[in-house]
Amino acid sequence: MRLRTRYAALAACLLVASAIAGCEGGRERPPAVAVRVLHAAPERDTLDFLREQRNEAQLEFRQTSGPLVFDADQYDFNIRTLAPSGNSSVLIGSFSRELVPDRDYFFAITEADGELTPVVLEKERFSGPSAEVTAVHAAPSLGRVSLYVEPDGVAPSSVTPIGTIGFGETVEPLTREEGSYRLSVTEAGNPDNVLMTSGVIALQEGLTYIFAVMEPGADSVAPMTVAFIGPESSVLFDESVQSTLTVINAAADGAARDVFLDDDFDTPLVAGAPPLARVADLPVAGGARDLTVTPAGNPGAIESELTSTYIRNRRHIALIGGDTGDLEVAFGVDDRRPIAGHARIMFLNAATQLDQLEYFLVEAGTDLSNLASTIVLSAPRMSSRVSFPPGDYDLIARELDGEIVGGPTPVTVAAGGVYSVLTIDGEVGGTVDFVFFEDFVE
């Protein structure tokens, strides 16, 4: 017997259970329905999906829940997210829906013009000797598109799309034989203008697959992404899309550096990266890559090597720090999404003369004596984006459990702003200076 997904198995079991179960007090329990939920709102952080006041799922951007099984009934669904202070959550919107027996539901949670705009797919429960495919359009900034699910090598211009949809619309389900396919997305009604072609995907008989067109998000490279929801969920993007890398040269000697990838020492990825500047995003093939740093124009004098994995469709950042001849590189994924109501800051430390530093972003005049730091970093290291409420602050750096070595420096951060601050050795021994990037200076 073919292995079924958790979704199909759970739905089937619950249908049987609801049909044969007796009821307490003579009342028969309502049939069960299955719901899956996608976080498709790029300007929101973690979302809580609540049925009435019960939290049913917590989702990151582009993440899809597993099957949520509810009794058939009328429900109010609430969407909450973390407040900028991090101490509470805030309601960003609600919607109501009647869940009908023998039907399945998919909610793509997104926003249009700042308002919660869920895209709801309701369909009959599927079973059969083929695979079922359907789609939703959950990207308000993108126009109408046509979608094609065809075997490898079949051009969209030679076949009929599974559907043509605009924001908020869904595709009537249809079937495909079990096998390997690619998803192609084109301009609506124009199969020659291909916007993306996915890698190969597998469809299994008896299962339903949903394609959800999503906003790209500033954490990604591709202008379009599609959630692929089947037994598990994943994100599809154009097969030609790679990743990007930006470099900050914060070597203590203030000299320019060359950056090479893999064993190509003839052509640097970055030639003569200037000190304390952020190099523009550069395309980099995904996968495990070797990054090498040398003095500018001297590829034989290797100062640092690092092997890292570059994730396709994502942005990456490399921070070069340390002393002459003994450099180190900190590497990470760079999520630059603006988040509604939040100011997001990345802290980077390249100050070699001190040990670990604590960072504070506090109201002017705040006593730090009994205050926990925002972030602690050695050098060279960097944090992920940290959220703060918009407003005016003092930026302060302190040696771990020691003296203040940088600031207080007044800064202002705005809702939806994306910021970076780099710490370097100060002109005065035992101190640090701040270098500001992104919305601090743009």
Image (spheres, rainbow, N blue to C red):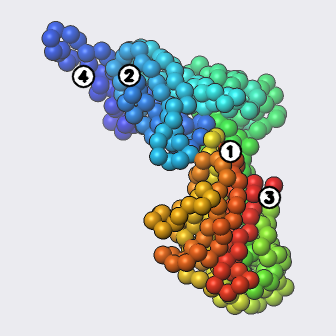
User: Which amino acid type is shown beneath numbered disc 4?
Assistant: Ala
Pick whichever of labels 4 and 1 is earlier in the sequence.
4
Pick whichever of labels 4 and 3 is earlier in the sequence.
4
User: Which amino acid type is shown beneath numbered disc 3?
Assistant: Val
- Relative depth, front residue between 316 and 44: 44
Pick whichever of labels 1 and 3 is earlier in the sequence.
1
Pick whichever of labels 4 and 2 is earlier in the sequence.
4
Residue at mark 2: 33
Residue at mark 4: 17
Could you tell me which residue is drawn at 78 percent across and 86 percent down?
295
Are the residues at dot 4 and dot 1 in contact (C-beta closer than 8 Å)? no
User: Which amino acid type is shown beneath numbered disc 2?
Assistant: Val
Are the residues at dot 4 and dot 3 in contact (C-beta closer than 8 Å)? no
- Relative depth, front residue between 19 and 319: 319
- Residue 264 placement: quadrant: bottom right
Residue at mark 1: 416
- Residue 92 placement: quadrant: top right
